[in-house]
């Protein structure tokens, strides 16, 4: 069962203050509501630029420039490779999200778990006497936190009655559960058929599946684990979710089941902490050694892509990272050094670039709607044990070709737009920002179409990548994305 966290309640006011900060917006006609009919007309207009991709930036193997505005507190240094895809044309496509099929789910299960019995992942959330004892301990600790906050003047004393009643009710419920709870979970009570199930089946089923229905009312989901035999714990999750994306995730670990069932269909693998799985705290653990070579890791990943028929994706990056993920049960935890190998969709030599997702939030009639179309990518984790993790996130499929061989603006004009906009976009009243651009790539990104979230336009864009130093805090990010056809700046958060 879920416990209220008094620390989070007490931090709410401070968090609201942080989120209330504002950032200046550029005052330019370049940032505007997009006219998609006009965009398509420009893509067909020979006077708009060039349709031969290799002529877009003929004189630019690199792009270098430095400029600043002291009054706005922004300095920019560009020393970047200009990356042009090896194709003679870029087009505009209409795309939609593609469901994860039962056939593909079965293929992945057979690839990684063919020799394992399969069980429902709800078993990882089953209560035992040990976990209930821990919940009692946490509830007592949270009450003590609230009492201390009252002594410190951070919470009104009259609120203690509310906290005390919640604590008493929680303890009564836990004590009742404790009487009938087993000492150990029997996985044989949680056998899985290995198939997708409609989320409507899980409405009010149990604590583990309540979130599944709440966040994916009209979709389908699969959550499975093995028995952890031979000390290897495997978990497989897949969903088709119209509001948060479609995805499949596989994990294996010698430390316990990795919590990879999450409604947001994105990829987030890196860090230096791991959830302990018992007390709710995050802990630091000893790292695993990584002796496999990068070339051998790439070979394993490439073989997987080929074997599973994912040939529309090409290797985009390979990085050595530290993977620390949410651990729920098992033995001693370790922090894995991994090769994180990312594959992006590649269309005739041109990549669909990272940070190409869509987002929609707001009132529609009487309903508040939040929808996310995360970035499409495949991320593979490789260690000395082989492939230990796969994320297949937000696959897309083409509905139709809107413009074959779009006309693109010359890079001279695009870089002028970048230089005109970047200082104003990153100006902040309180921060000094140093921006460094080390890569400029021409590829594809998905933008939203007016009136629909179910489809998007896949259009040619220029992506300016690098780092933003906010008074000492350095973030690696996409600095700016510019539509290669009409020169408008794309807001990656809005999707257009």
Image (spheres, rainbow, N blue to C red):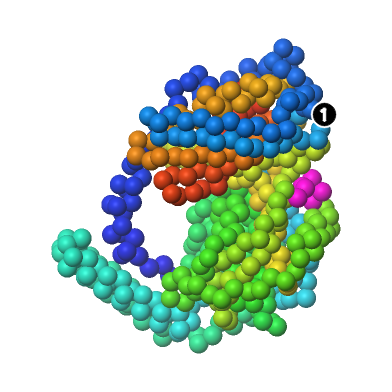
Q: Position of residue 229 (x, y in %)?
A: 69, 82
Relative to 237, is 58 on the left or the right? Answer: right
Q: How many marks?
A: 1
The answer to whether residue 313 is left or right of residue 487 is right
Seen from the viewer's position, the closer of residues 492 and 208 is 492
Q: Tell me which corner region of the image, top left, top right, bottom left or bottom right, holds residue 303.
A: bottom right
Q: Is residue 428 above or below residue 259?
A: above
**Where's the C terminus, which quadrant?**
top right
Q: Which residues are magenta?
A: 310-315
Give the left or right position of residue 274, taking residue 388 as reference: left
Q: Residue at x 63, y 21 (%)?
A: 413
Secondary structure beneath dot 1 equals loop
> Which residue occupies 73% across, 25% down?
59
- 80 in the magenta segment: no
Place residue 408 in its image quadrant: top right
Which residue is rendered at x = 47% and y = 31% of the image? 68
* Foreground pick, 81 / 282: 81
User: Residue 402 location, x and y as percent?
Assistant: 73, 25
Query: For mark 1, what is the residue?
Result: 88
Count residues near mark 1 (Cα–Cα under 10 Å), then give few for <14, some for 14-19, many for 20+.
Answer: some
- x and y percent of residue 251 in the render? 66, 66
Closest to the observer, 475 or 357: 475
Image quarter hosting the N terminus: bottom left
Q: Position of residue 118 (x, y in %)?
A: 69, 73
Residue 318 appearing in the image: yes
């Amino acid at each position: 069962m879920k416990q209220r966290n008094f620390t989070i309640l007490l931090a709410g006011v401070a968090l609201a203050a942080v989120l209330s900060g504002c950032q200046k917006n550029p005052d330019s006609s370049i940032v505007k509501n997009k006219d998609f009919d006009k965009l398509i007309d420009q893509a067909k207009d020979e006077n708009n630029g060039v349709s031969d991709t290799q002529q877009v930036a003929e004189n630019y193997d690199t792009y270098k420039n430095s400029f600043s505005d002291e009054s706005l507190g922004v300095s920019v240094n560009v020393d970047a490779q200009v990356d042009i895809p090896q194709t003679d044309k870029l087009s505009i496509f209409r795309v939609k999200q593609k469901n994860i099929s039962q056939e593909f789910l079965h293929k992945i299960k057979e690839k990684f778990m063919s020799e394992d019995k399969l069980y429902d992942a709800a078993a990882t959330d089953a209560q035992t006497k040990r976990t209930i004892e821990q919940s009692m301990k946490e509830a007592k600790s949270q009450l003590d936190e609230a009492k201390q906050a009252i002594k410190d003047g951070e919470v009104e004393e009259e609120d203690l009655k509310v906290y005390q009643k919640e604590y008493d009710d929680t303890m009564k419920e836990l004590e009742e559960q404790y009487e009938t709870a087993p000492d150990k979970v029997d996985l044989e009570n949680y056998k899985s058929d290995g198939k997708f199930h409609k989320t409507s089946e899980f409405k009010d089923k149990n604590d583990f599946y309540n979130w599944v229905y709440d966040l994916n009312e009209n979709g389908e989901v699969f959550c499975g684990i093995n028995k952890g035999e031979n000390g290897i714990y495997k978990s497989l999750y897949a969903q088709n979710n119209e509001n948060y994306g479609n995805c499949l995730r596989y994990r294996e670990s010698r430390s316990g089941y990795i919590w990879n069932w999450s409604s947001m269909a994105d990829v987030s693998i890196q860090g230096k902490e791991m959830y302990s799985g018992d007390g709710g705290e995050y802990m630091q653990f000893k790292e695993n050694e990584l002796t496999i070579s990068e070339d051998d890791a790439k070979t394993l990943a490439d073989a997987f892509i080929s074997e599973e028929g994912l040939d529309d994706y090409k290797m985009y990056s390979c990085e050595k990272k530290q993977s620390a993920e949410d651990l729920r049960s098992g033995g001693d935890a370790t922090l894995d050094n991994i090769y994180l190998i990312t594959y992006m969709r590649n269309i005739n030599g041109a990549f669909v670039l990272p940070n190409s997702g869509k987002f929609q939030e707001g009132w529609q009639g009487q309903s508040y709607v939040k929808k996310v179309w995360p970035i499409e990518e495949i991320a593979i984790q490789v260690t000395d044990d082989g492939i230990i993790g796969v994320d297949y996130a937000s696959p897309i499929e083409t509905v139709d070709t809107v413009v074959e061989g779009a006309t693109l603006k010359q890079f001279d004009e695009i870089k002028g737009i970048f230089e005109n906009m970047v200082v104003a976009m990153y100006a902040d009243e309180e921060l000094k920002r140093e921006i460094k651009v080390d890569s400029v790539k021409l590829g594809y990104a998905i933008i939203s179409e007016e009136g629909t979230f179910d489809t998007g336009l896949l259009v040619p864009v220029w992506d300016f990548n690098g780092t933003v130093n906010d008074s000492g805090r350095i973030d690696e990010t996409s600095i700016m994305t510019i539509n290669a056809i009409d020169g408008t700046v794309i807001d990656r958060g809005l999707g257009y």
